[in-house]
Image (cartoon, rainbow, N blue to C red):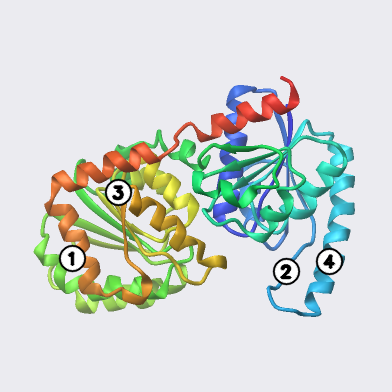
Amino acid sequence: MRVVLSGGGTGGHIYPALAIARECKKSDPNSEFLYIGTEKGLESKLVRDEGLPFETIEITGFRRKLSFENVKTIMRFLRGVSRAKELLRTFKPDVVIGTGGYVCGPVVYAAAKLGIPTIIHEQNVIPGLTNKFLSRYASTVALSFEESKSYFDKAKHVLFTGNPRATAVVEANRERGFASLGLPQDSELVLVVGGSRGARVVNEAMIGMVPFLKKLPDVHFVYVTGQQYYEDTRKAVLQANSGLRNHLHVLPYVSNMPEVLAATTVAVSRAGASSLAELTALGIPSILIPSPNVTNNHQEANARSLEQAGAAVMLLESKLSAQQLFKEIEQLIMQRDKRKLMSDRAKAYGQPDSAARIVAEMKRLTGE
């Protein structure tokens, strides 16, 4: 099968596409891929690191307020469609898959106009403008959350698949996770992370929690700060630390996140769709702090969905404090029955076979 993948901007759009590529290769070792993204997006590094052929188009997103910049965006979109058609005619894909981000717009639209079967994957409960626009043209809209279906009433076909990132982490090796952190096997581990780039507010809560950590002397805490916040957070933690250095680990970034998550007892996280797919696939009890600085406040909707399922606790950033965050962590560590129930519900919510579901849909659309 010849497959074009497109998704860009953030890891939440790129990692699902890469998970689909891996599953497709597993199903059909002769599969060939072309990834179309932007040069400025994170995909330009991640896709090349994965070893997939990579081509670029230039595109930006629409501004939600009236602006002359939107006229320029329309012109970029039309040029992007023309460029995408050239790439598609050359590569001759059997199917085109968009996993989110502005770059999917011209790529999936061009494919639909050329009569190529298309799938768009929506990671969040509340879809973005690009996927809502593309849903009229795509052959199939694949959903991470069943609640999203009402937003795609004009779609030809809607399919609940879960998020393919779940497939990429479900078999992660927890022993390697402990080893990479230098921790004894089966340690109780609390992972606190504010997203791939970090989050100032979450880091401030991390620092504020340090004096309370002595109440859980047998628990290891791993703070993942993000590169830009690392030095300041590390220094502040060292100043606040009172004899817990062997149980408090401050890191700028974790490159093997699936393995570290597999070793995690309780996670504190933002509520991006890929993060939630990872947490639920592994059945990790979580405390979610949705970012309010995202389109349509979609992270709060994501987090609320898990909270209502009993799979997570949600703390709004506006009400976040070090004391409240530690209280929630302490309850989950001390109340094993509650933690076990939350873990079971997280696993029930997760979709570890998500990538396989999408590959099955690809084969249906292409007649294989």
Tag 1–tag 4 contact (CB < 8 Å): no
Query: Which quarter shows the N terminus?
Result: top right
Question: As displayed, is residue 170 above or below residue 83?
Answer: above
**Where is mark 4, residue-wise?**
74
Q: Which quadrant would residue 234 be assigned to in this image?
A: bottom left
**Residue at horizontal 69 percent and vertical 23 percent from the top:** 30
User: Which comes before the other along the chain, label 2 or label 3?
Assistant: 2
In this view, the mark in front (1 or 3):
3
The three-letter amino acid code for the residue at tag 4 is Ile
Which of 11 and 230 lies nearest the eye of the viewer? Answer: 11
User: Real-space Cα distance between discs 2 and 3?
Assistant: 36 Å
Q: Is residue 247 visible?
A: no
**Where is mark 3, residue-wise?**
310
User: Real-space Cα distance between discs 2 and 4?
Assistant: 8 Å
The three-letter amino acid code for the residue at tag 1 is Lys
**Where is mark 1, residue-wise?**
327
Which of 18 and 354 lies nearest the eye of the viewer? Answer: 354
Q: Which quadrant would residue 200 be assigned to in this image?
A: bottom left
**Where is mark 2, residue-wise?**
62
User: Which comes before the other along the chain, label 1 or label 4?
Assistant: 4
